[in-house]
């Protein structure tokens, strides 16, 4: 099998992580773990080729680096934040050309890949300006395109997903279009018609950086190598992605642990109350990041800062409690033990509303009442965001 996709350095501030993977490297390692020989094509400055070969060495991976000017670094503050990359405007290298029976092609920042393949899986990974598969002359006997909900609308030039999928299929002669829709799961289209939706699966922790790489690699292995159906392949890919989010270990193997994963069912349209102080720049930043992350997940949010703001004590309290009464879950930021936040937690638990509390440095003694009243304590921002969304929907 051929994987053509980038090798990039990835840094995350919180939780701290510094690795060399990129979409191509992570996918190659995941597929190689299943015992499949992988020819991996990527860009790398000549002086870094040996380091890349050693850092991602595997008996099933053959490296085919193509020269580029610089090694690109992606820097995330947390796994749900938008990355800052450097160099910010990388020089474009000549296109990589590959030909094979089964090919997984990712989008590049420093070049392009022209593919001639049998079964091809294409993941442009470019939400701002996704590029069609065939624009550069690539062809495939059978083509599956993996897009998120934003990419499919932009690539299909329509706000109606079904219409956008049909346009994408026509432009690229795609047999399969997979639309990843976050908490709504992955919708599988064949010849422009919706075949079904594969659910997301629950993980104890959520580390999102690289999760899309694992999804595409898993689908490519199941559909491209094993010849499984589109729906079955997408379901295994969703399960492998959940496992990766918890362990950070890229693999496409469908083991017994995957079969035991529980799907996330959106049983109702919930609303999440964001409880936390917003009196300093740091506190405001956390509230803003939480509001943005939850909104991008498709969750409905009530944030006292955004919805009520500042005012007299009686005005603020009445409006906040009214908003809390209409919510189905609470996401609380409790470091610092803000009295207003603690009151809101107690009020919510008295009404049996689930509370997800993010605590990174609270003392054990501060958590006694929260633990004793059934609050869900999380020490990781991105995991807290997802857990709050899941609790609000169940």
Image (cartoon, rainbow, N blue to C red):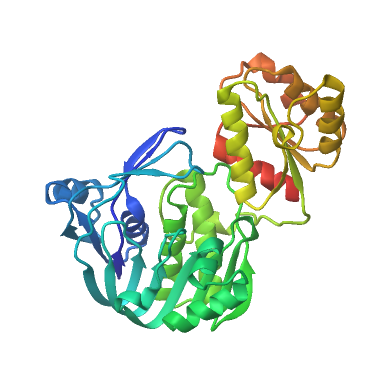
Q: Is residue 99 above or below residue 309?
A: below
* 289 sits to left or right of 367: left
Q: Is residue 168 above or below residue 376?
A: below
Q: Image point 65% across, 25% down: which residue?
A: 278
Residue 352 visible here: no
Residue 348 visible here: yes
Q: Give residue 325's position: percent from left, percent from top.
A: 86, 38
Furthest-left residue in this view: 47
Residue 110, by quadrant, is bottom left
* 348 sits to left or right of 108: right
Furthest-front residue in this view: 311
Pick the residue in front: 245 or 297: 297
The quadrant of the image that shows the N terminus is: bottom left
Residue 141, by quadrant, is bottom left
* 25 sits to left or right of 260: left
Instruction: Give the number of callouts.
Output: 0
Q: Give residue 54's position: percent from left, percent from top.
A: 19, 47
Q: Is residue 203 above or below residue 304?
A: below
Q: Image point 63% across, 72% down: which residue?
A: 160
Q: Image point 77% across, 28% down: which residue?
A: 345
Q: Give residue 392's position: percent from left, percent from top.
A: 74, 46
* 275 sits to left or right of 48: right
Q: Give residue 191's position: percent from left, percent from top.
A: 54, 84
């Amino acid at each position: 099998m051929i994987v053509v996709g980038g090798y990039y350095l990835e840094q995350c501030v919180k939780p701290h992580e510094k690795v060399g993977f990129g979409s191509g490297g992570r996918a190659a390692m995941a597929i190689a773990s299943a015992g499949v020989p992988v020819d991996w094509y990527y860009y790398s400055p000549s002086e870094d080729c040996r380091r890349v070969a050693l850092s991602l060495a595997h008996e099933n991976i053959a490296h085919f680096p193509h020269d580029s000017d610089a090694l690109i670094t992606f820097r995330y503050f947390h796994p749900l934040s938008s990355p800052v990359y450097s160099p910010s405007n990388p020089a474009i290298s000549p296109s990589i050309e590959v030909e094979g029976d089964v090919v997984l092609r990712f989008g590049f920042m420093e070049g392009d890949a022209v593919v001639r393949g049998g079964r091809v899986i294409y993941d442009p990974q470019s939400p701002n300006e996704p590029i069609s598969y065939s624009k550069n002359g690539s062809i495939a006997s059978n083509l599956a395109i993996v897009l998120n909900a934003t990419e499919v609308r932009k690539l299909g030039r329509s706000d109606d997903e079904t219409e956008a999928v049909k346009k994408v299929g026509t432009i690229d002669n795609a047999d399969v279009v997979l639309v990843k829709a976050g908490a709504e799961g992955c919708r599988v289209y064949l010849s422009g018609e919706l075949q079904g939706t594969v659910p997301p699966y629950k993980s104890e922790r959520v580390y999102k950086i690289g999760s899309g790489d694992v999804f595409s690699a898993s689908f490519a292995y199941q559909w491209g190598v094993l010849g499984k159906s589109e729906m079955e392949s997408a379901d295994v890919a969703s399960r492998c992605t959940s496992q990766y989010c918890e362990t950070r270990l890229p693999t496409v193997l469908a083991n017994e642990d995957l079969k035991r994963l529980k799907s996330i069912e959106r049983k109702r349209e919930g609303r999440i109350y964001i409880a936390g102080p917003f009196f300093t720049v740091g506190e405001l930043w956390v509230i803003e990041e939480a509001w943005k992350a939850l909104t991008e997940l498709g969750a409905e949010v009530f944030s006292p800062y955004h919805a009520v703001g500042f005012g007299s004590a009686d005005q603020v309290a009445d409006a906040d409690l009214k908003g809390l009464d209409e919510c189905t879950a609470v996401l609380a930021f409790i470091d610092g033990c803000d009295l207003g936040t603690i009151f809101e937690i107690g009020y919510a638990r008295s009404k049996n509303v689930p509370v997800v509390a993010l605590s990174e440095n609270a003392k054990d003694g501060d958590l006694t009442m929260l633990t004793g009243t059934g609050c869900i304590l999380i020490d990781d921002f991105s995991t807290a965001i997802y857990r709050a969304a899941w609790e609000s929907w169940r």
